[in-house]
């Protein structure tokens, strides 16, 4: 089996939260038997022309609008699937002097690419805090793959941010019906029940999320807030303490702990926790400092 490689590069703008410009190097390798003096019988000018066409498209663009969240993996996937007519063995994408990814033929589902691309674009928009736009891409992903668990989950998140809690809950339920072990689906389901004032169902969902993700400070702190809403302040405090033990830099957990302590009449301890929350946010050490929609 013979191999032949093609090289290209491009420079583009990217970033879901902070915009920056980087240079990328691309290597595409095809393989096959030698036929008529060419690997796999393919004139090398054809794949080279196609690769240059793709990198020209990516060059000087906003990558997130083309490939979705602009990770090296997503860029490699985009190039691989758009060159699917050739017997590609590997695509390598290197972000100049930083990181690189190698994507092999055995790792790529070309048929699933259209749904993945829609999902990636939706994910990028959600990270940019544009749920009203992101929701349409998740819908496209679902139309292309009816069992796309993550797409149902993130569309539900978009709907939650748009205050459409009933439809959000329906999406979380659909995600869980496809994969009962999907912990994030259960966590988001719990939050949807909270907004719908369905507190018993909320606790059940959070319990399931924590069983599946015992180290998720988000799920544990969410349940703690649920207990707080139910005025079960001691259980709320217990959960906030566990969340902080898992992630000491989780500012919201410190704030929620302060509210639970205040409700229990422990005002001095509450003030200390409130100060800790404010300090984490002020110094930028909060785990979710740059994340609004999580």
Image: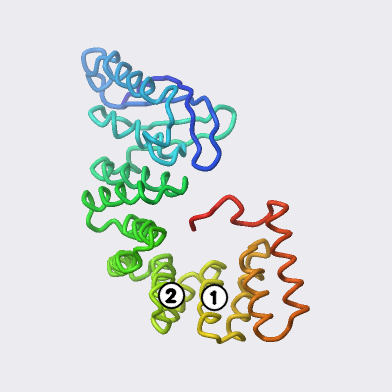
230, above or below 243, in the image: below
User: Residue extending furthest front?
Assistant: 163
Question: Along the horizontal axis of the image, is 263 left or right of 228?
Answer: right
**Residue 205 placed where, x, y %?**
41, 76
Q: Residues within 10 Å of mark 2 (few under 14, many from 20)?
A: many
Residues at circles 2 and 1 in contact by the CB criterion of under 8 Å: yes
Q: How has the structure been colored for display?
A: rainbow
Q: Residues within 10 Å of mark 1 (few under 14, many from 20)?
A: many
In which image quadrant can residue 185 be found? bottom left
Q: Residue at x 41, y 45 (%)?
A: 125
> Residue 194 bears which disc, if any?
2
Q: Where, quadrant-wise, is the N terminus in this rendering?
A: top left
Question: Number of callouts in the render?
Answer: 2
**Residue 156 placed where, x, y %?**
35, 61
The CA span between labels 2 and 1 is 9 Å
130, above or below 211, in the image: above
Q: Please, what secondary structure does the residue beneath circle 1 have?
A: helix
Of residues 263 and 283, the one nearer the viewer is: 263
In which image quadrant can residue 163 be found? bottom left
**Residue 40 placed where, x, y %?**
24, 23
Of residues 250 and 44, the one nearer the viewer is: 250
> Residue 48 bears which disc, if any?
none
**Residue 55 placed where, x, y %?**
38, 22
Q: Residue at x 29, y 31 (%)?
A: 82
Q: Please, what secondary structure does the residue beneath circle 2 have?
A: helix
Q: Earlier in the sequence, mark 2 or mark 1?
A: 2
> Residue 225 bears which disc, if any?
1
283, above or below 26, in the image: below
């Amino acid at each position: 089996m013979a191999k032949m490689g093609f090289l290209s590069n491009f420079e583009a703008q990217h970033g879901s939260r902070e915009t920056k410009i980087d240079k990328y190097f691309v290597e595409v390798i095809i393989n096959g038997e030698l036929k008529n003096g060419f690997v796999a019988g393919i004139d090398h000018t054809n794949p080279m022309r196609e690769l240059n066409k793709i990198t020209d498209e990516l060059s000087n663009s906003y990558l997130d609008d083309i490939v979705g969240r602009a990770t090296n993996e997503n860029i490699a996937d985009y190039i691989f699937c758009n060159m699917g007519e050739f017997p590609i063995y590997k695509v390598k994408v290197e972000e100049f002097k930083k990181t690189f990814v190698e994507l092999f033929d055995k790792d790529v589902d070309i048929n699933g690419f259209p749904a993945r691309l829609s999902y990636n674009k939706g994910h990028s928009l959600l990270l940019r805090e544009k749920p009203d736009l992101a929701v349409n891409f998740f819908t496209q992903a679902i139309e292309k793959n009816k069992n796309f668990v993550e797409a149902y989950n993130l569309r539900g998140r978009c709907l939650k941010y748009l205050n459409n809690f009933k439809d959000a809950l329906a999406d979380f339920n659909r995600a869980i019906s496809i994969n009962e072990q999907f912990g994030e689906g259960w966590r988001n389901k719990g939050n949807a029940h909270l907004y719908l004032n369905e507190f018993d169902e909320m606790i059940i969902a959070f319990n399931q999320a924590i069983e599946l993700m015992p180290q998720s400070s988000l799920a544990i702190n969410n349940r703690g807030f649920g207990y707080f809403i139910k005025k079960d302040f001691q259980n709320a405090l217990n959960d906030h303490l566990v969340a902080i033990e898992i992630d000491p830099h989780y500012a919201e957990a410190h704030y929620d702990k302060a509210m639970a302590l205040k409700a229990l009449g422990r005002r001095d301890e509450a003030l200390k926790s409130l100060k800790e929350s404010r300090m984490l946010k002020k110094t930028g050490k909060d785990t979710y400092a740059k994340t609004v929609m999580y």
